[in-house]
Amino acid sequence: MSTLKMFYDEDDIIVTPTRYPKSISQVAENVTVITADDIKALNAHTLADALVYVTGLQLFDQGSPGSYVNGMIQGSQPWHVLLMIDGVAMNNLSESTPDLGLVPVQIIERIEIIKGPASSSWGSSLGGVINVITRSPDDTREFGGMLSASIGERNTGDYRLEISGGKGGFGYYLSGGGMLTDGLLPYNGYHGGNFYTKLKYSCSEKAVVAFTLGYTRGVRQVGAFREQIPELGAELVGTIDSKNENLFTTLGLDYQVARGLALNVSLRALWQDTVLSQKTIIEPFGLEIDSKKEGSDAGFGGSAKLVWTQRLHEMVVGTDFDTARLKSPNIEGGKQRQDKWAVYVNDSLTLGKFSVTPGLRFDHTNTNGDFWSPSLGVTFAPAENTILRAYVARGFNTPFLSSTFGNGVNIITNPDLKMEKIWSYVVGLETTFFRYFWFKTSLFRHDISDVIDTVSLPDDTPDNPDDDNRMWVNVGKQRRQGLEVELKTMPLYNTSLSLGYALLDSTDRLTGDGVPNMPQYTWDVGIQYDDRKSFRATLKGHFISWDVNPDVYVTHSSMTWDLYLAKKIYSSEYQSMEIFFSARNIFKGAQYFRDIFRNTGRWVEGGIRFHF
């Protein structure tokens, strides 16, 4: 592992796979880690900005900062991707999709991404997990922090303040900020703010209590549309706006019961409120139609786990419980509940050069029944610079509430929907065998059954009197398989290179046809210069080829290039000042799935950071 460590953070520790810190050499899953330094090098605004260049992850909508963004992991649907912050699942109840554009990056210490099902640890997560691990208090001094501000085109600004410190066993981290833009695309503005705090107190040498609270609020101009109605000689012209509020909080206790035996107990709560407004004018008649879609999630839950560590193994036994309520006029009865509980056990056994990680979890839901999720991972280190990985897992995804209890126009819901199921197989290699080069590759195969989608109802049925209704159903089976390759170099004259490639084949296992609207392959390339003293420059290129119907979707496939610069202009023991500059999509590349997910053209911004 000595040469591999040169390509990781200071500590080669991963938390997400078994919900307990373990060495990267024992991780059998396909995992990507993004550190706070990586995020800083990209001058990122939101979590979405930090995920753009992750191999095997494809994002929708790279509009103005603060835009609504979700995405796929290895071709999974957006509702298959579980977003966690401080152990709180942030996916909404209505569509079960995470809002990656609403998470501010300044609170992030690191991001761990599992590509493939993680149900044996986390439950419903057929596509994978994006686990955001937030910053902890800086207990090396009593007071410190960071102040930053940036400004760009179209009145785009991002303003942040952080303070952190600790004394006498007590530590604190506080962060607040605001982001705004008039819109880098037509009708694509955003105005919002955020606040976050983490407090820790060491009650004794054995016990630590932690409290977190996060809040975001934003107003978005989602977009404008124009649609022709030839049969009426009319045109629909409209705009879509949204208001979002999110609040989450946790309270946890870590207690060292005995040598090699630790207990963690945590409570959590989440509240999310979304209002989507649409204004439509029928021209030339001047008829105006206003519509509104509202949804409010409120839930709480808790977790408890016992960790037993010995020389040969680390065993985690735990339980989760969550209850949540969705209130919305678009849901039958105006509100629905979802209750879940689970028990799980994961172990990591070290046998010489081998590591074996078995896992098993049982989930119960009041909406869609029960599910068992087994997994087994093996790693083998034939040399200190090479790791071989193999992983097999069964996973699931719980149907989102709008598919089972919604009352949407022209879409018939189905309370009898079954969970989507998956068997996943992954083999991989990670090595620095070639000196100064880090190489990682993974082959994966995901077999999905009971796939959830909408289908047209037969004409003249009681549920379809207008011959245009669709219904949510479990439509069949799919297979997603492919390859990922990643390459990085050690710095030479302070310059390093990176390359990422992902190939995906998606097939309907019943018909043998390809699955439409899927990514085919992606490229991510980068070059970075960092003198480790005062200057850093990063150039990133990103490309996705989509398999879409050109008669329905607007497809463009040109690489986008982004440039990020930073220069330290002052530095002392506890203080430093840095100016930074970003030029995104330098060559105005069009790289979007369809019009509603259009990317911005070239735009620039600059700013300053002051650490104290």
Image (cartoon, rainbow, N blue to C red):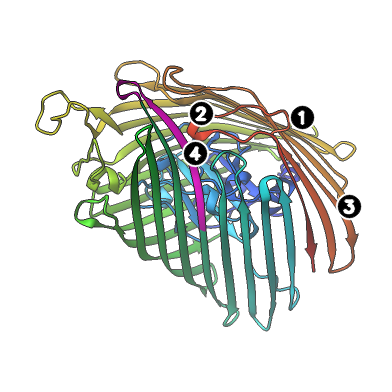
Q: Nearer the viewer, mark 3 or mark 1?
A: 3
Tell whether label 2 touches label 3 (CB within 8 Å). Answer: no
SS state under label 4:
strand
Q: Main secondary structure of the magenta part?
A: strand
Which image quarter is the C terminus in? bottom right
- Coordinates of residue 9 in the picture (x, y in percent): 71, 50
Residue under pointer 2: 593
Q: CA distance from mark 4 to mark 1?
A: 34 Å
Can the viewer see residue 310?
Answer: yes
Residue under pointer 3: 533
SS state under label 2:
loop
State which region is magenta: 218-233
Q: Amino acid at mark 1?
A: Phe
Q: Residue furthest left?
A: 462
Q: Is residue 612 left or right of residue 20?
A: right
- Coordinates of residue 550 in the picture (x, y in percent): 46, 17
- Coordinates of residue 262 in the picture (x, y in percent): 50, 69
Q: Is residue 452 above or below residue 512?
A: below
Based on the picture, tell me whether residue 583 belongs to the magenta stretch: no
Residue under pointer 1: 434
Q: Nearer the viewer, mark 2 or mark 1?
A: 2
